[in-house]
Amino acid sequence: MRTTINIFLSLVFLLIVSFSYRVCAETIELNSDTVLVIHDKNLWKRLPDTFDPQNIKAMSLWYDKQQTVDSIIGQSGRFVTKLTVSANSADRWFLVPNTNFIDHGLAYYFNANGLKEAAQEFSQLADNKTPQLLHFQAFNLTMDKGDKGELWVVISAQKYPSSVSIKLLNSEAFYRFQSINNMLSVAAIFAMLLLALLTLFIYLGTRNRIAITCAGYLGFHGIGWAAASGLIDDVFNLSINTVYLGMYIFPLAIAFAAQFVSDLFECKHNHRKTFKFLYWLSVASAVAAGVIALTSFSFAFAVSHMLAVLWIAVTIVIGIHMLKLKDFRAKYFLFGNLLYGLSLIYYMLSHSDTFGELDYAESLVVSALAIDCICIMLSLTEWFKIKQSEYNRNFYLSRLDPLTKLGNRYALNEGISKLGSHYVVVYLDIDGLKKTNDNLGHGEGDKLITFAAEYLLETFSSQGSVFRTGGDEFVILLPQLNLNQLSNTLKSTQALLVLLPTKIQEKWAQAGISFGICDSTEQNTPSQCLSQADKRMYLQKEQRRAKHSA
């Protein structure tokens, strides 16, 4: 709770700071410490496709006759603005249009004598000519002290999802912004892709479905942001503007995310309504990914952002609900998505007319998403811990006799496989159990079995292991260190087992035991030894019956 409050206060502080640097688009005085924002209200004029932006004479005549648009948010195409700038010191300044999507950008400066400097391209496909800045494009303006002139800026894009203001930064401020922005973005994207690769390896090792849905969740988010930030183009120098791809990839991330959440909380078995909702959300997201691939970018942008808002709401509701049910896999899941949700609010405010130009909006979102992905991995770890605990418990119970708490036949097989070269095997059977059940009831028969088991466990647990292999049958394995111990062990075992019938008959007069003993010197393998002990036990039982009949 305290962490959430601190994040909220930090956002409020950034909002307050951002207002102090907003200026209107009039004559701009440049100083060595200049850091300002030129708001886009009445900044831009739509430029017809027929105009050559480098024909300054024709464009100047046209520009003076045109009206500025109130804002270019939500629009597309080419726009131009003219800024009057004057330098109070000799320096280099950098201009950063506040938009992620620029297909083509052009800037040129005319000094007071009407001399034109070389035009600068700052589009995504020409970013090798401009400073490397993820999520944005930038160009520089170098002026001497006392210089004054006009700066023309032309931009073209398929979609302007937000108000396109222009940040104007001195060299020190720009390089600081560039370093922080790029460092946060690259680290976050790398973290997402690395976690996706890790979960993919986990899937290859475990074949658990949840691992592949988690890998898709993390991987498509990482690839989407690598594309949207321009990192893919910067690394591979592609001939297409990859920043648009992020919007087309995002629905696939949601499709995998919905399936991951369903797997994480085992909704198919424990939360049927949630399972159905997440299933159809996943299907709808996958279908949306296919549909928007065939439509305009504006439509893809709208669909992806609606899915983002819906997804954050869904994850927070599910997280809170699971915590109420004391499913603590939700603790990391909820924290990560709350943080991501707050960053998205900050991002949307930074692209609004009211709160525009908040610093590091894109890099903060992708960093928050990376933290969310780490929380997702922690949730996945909790899931595997629970499954491992359940497996261990089931494994233990599958090898445990529920009545006597002794090992069963599966446990006996494991015990036999671990025997060394020297050992003693005892096969024991309770006589008269059926009569006890018939005359006194099965409850009394269970007491007889339990009594015998407790005696055997108390007597032989320090020397070896005791197993119940059937209704009235027990096996004792007594490992020996060397041959010298065998003789003494055989004698002491025989003596201890002879005492058991007397103890049993004190409570159940018709009951007794029969047993057979075999050691490792008599047979080649433990299984053969067990079989020999079984034969001797039945031989003893038959001899006792014959004697009783006589």
Image: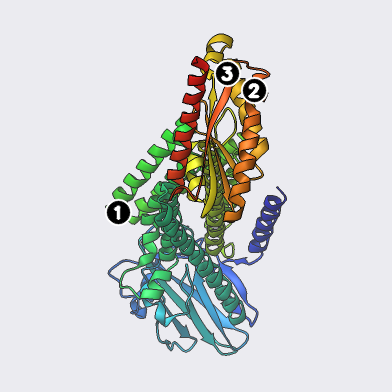
Describe the element under mark 3 as helix, strand or loop: helix
At x 57%, y 58%, the residue is 371
Q: Residue furthest top?
A: 439
Judging by the rendered image, the residue that carries numbered circle 2 is: 504
Task: Say above or below: 536 vs 34.
Answer: above
Report x, y in % for residue 534: 46, 35
Mark found first going from the N terminus, 3 or 2: 3
Q: Is residue 123 visible?
A: no
Q: Which amino acid, mark 3?
A: Gly
Q: How far apart are the two marked residues, 3 and 1, measured between alpha carbons?
A: 72 Å
Report x, y in % for residue 347: 54, 56
Q: Nearer the viewer, mark 3 or mark 2?
A: 2
| 256 left or right of 180 in image | left
Q: How far apart are the two marked residues, 1 and 2, measured between alpha carbons?
A: 80 Å
Q: Which amino acid, mark 1?
A: Ala
Judging by the rendered image, the residue that carries numbered circle 3 is: 445
At x 64%, y 61%, the residue is 19
Q: Nearer the viewer, mark 3 or mark 1?
A: 3
Describe the element under mark 1 as helix, strand or loop: loop
Mark found first going from the N terminus, 1 or 2: 1
Task: Say above or below: 250 vs 398.
Answer: below
Q: Check if mark 3's residue and mark 2's residue have beta carbons within 8 Å.
A: no
| Number of residues whose C-alpha sits closer than 10 Å to that of mark 3, classed few (under 14), some (14–19) or many (20 or more) | many
Q: Is residue 88 visible?
A: yes
Q: Which residue is at the front of the view, 451 or 101?
A: 451
Q: Which residue is at the front of the view, 173 or 116?
A: 173
Report x, y in % for residue 315: 52, 43
Judging by the rendered image, the residue that carries numbered circle 1 is: 293
At x 44%, y 80%, the residue is 130
Task: Say above or below: 312 vs 100.
Answer: above
